[in-house]
Image (cartoon, rainbow, N blue to C red):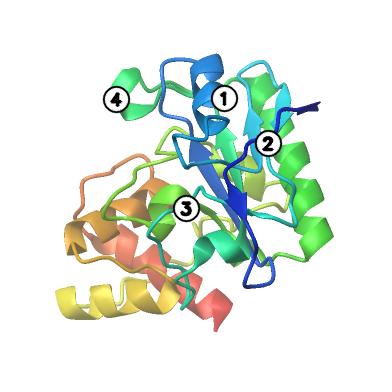
Amino acid sequence: MIWTPSPNFGLRKLPISILVLHYTGMQDGPSAINWLANPKSGVSAHYVVEEDGQIIHMVKEEDRAHHAGVSHWRGITDVNSASIGIEIVNPGHEWGYRPFPKEQMLSVKKLCKLIIKSHDIVLQNVIGHSDIAPDRKSDPGELFDWDDLANEGLAIQTPREKLIDPAWDHEAVIRNLRRYGYEADDDEKMITAFQRRFRRDKVDGKMDGECRSILRSLLLETA
């Protein structure tokens, strides 16, 4: 782990209860790290994970990094104060989105395990940037292997057994997405964010029977 401090941080106003995963969305790792360390950018993250697995530590965990922006999760609106942010080097949808290498995912999992254990973070609060900001963000995206994390007890597993379609209408779907933790002005973007996390093979912004069944199971698990 390499200490490369960013000047872009502040004081927390809430205890740590959320872990947010991002992709950098820039052409390469050095560009992303330089931007996160630039005082003119105003943005930062606690950690950056390079494609070869190297971990860059940029903001101390006790400090509030500027990674979440305008966001919302389960009633928390100052997500920066309540979270730790990990930026995962990947060009993202704008610069040539691609799968995350094995070496990188191994480091992401090791880092997540340490953070979750250290701060007693519940798995429902291990989320992506698109989950907390559906109107604005799409990272870490549908190519990020959430199942890999879930199989090691580091994220919520996508329900795949005993799925029952509750046949909710659109209003009920949106109401139940908000019950789970999502919030957005654009309904289609909220559904898309849910799919990027829990139904990654078909991200189309349309809540079909499979999506409704998955959401129903998730709500029952967290009831």
Give the number of the mark in front: 4 or 2.
2
Give the number of the mark in front: 2 or 3.
2
10 Å crowding of disc 4: few (<14), some (14-19), many (20+): few
10 Å crowding of disc 2: few (<14), some (14-19), many (20+): many
181 left or right of 84?
left
Tell me the amino acid under the disc marked 1.
Ile
| C-alpha gap between disc 1 and disc 3 | 16 Å
Q: Nearer the viewer, residue 126 or 36?
A: 36
Residue 58, position as x, y percentages in the image: 68, 36
Q: Quadrant of residue 81?
A: bottom right
Q: Which residue is mark 2?
A: 58
3 left or right of 170?
right
Tell me the amino acid under the disc marked 4.
Glu
Q: Which residue is mark 3?
A: 68
Marks 2/1 in contact by CB < 8 Å: the verdict is: yes
| C-alpha gap between disc 4 and disc 3 | 19 Å
| C-alpha gap between disc 2 and disc 3 | 15 Å
Compared with 164, 140 (above or below) is above
Compared with 107, 197 (above or below) is below
Q: Which residue is mark 1?
A: 33
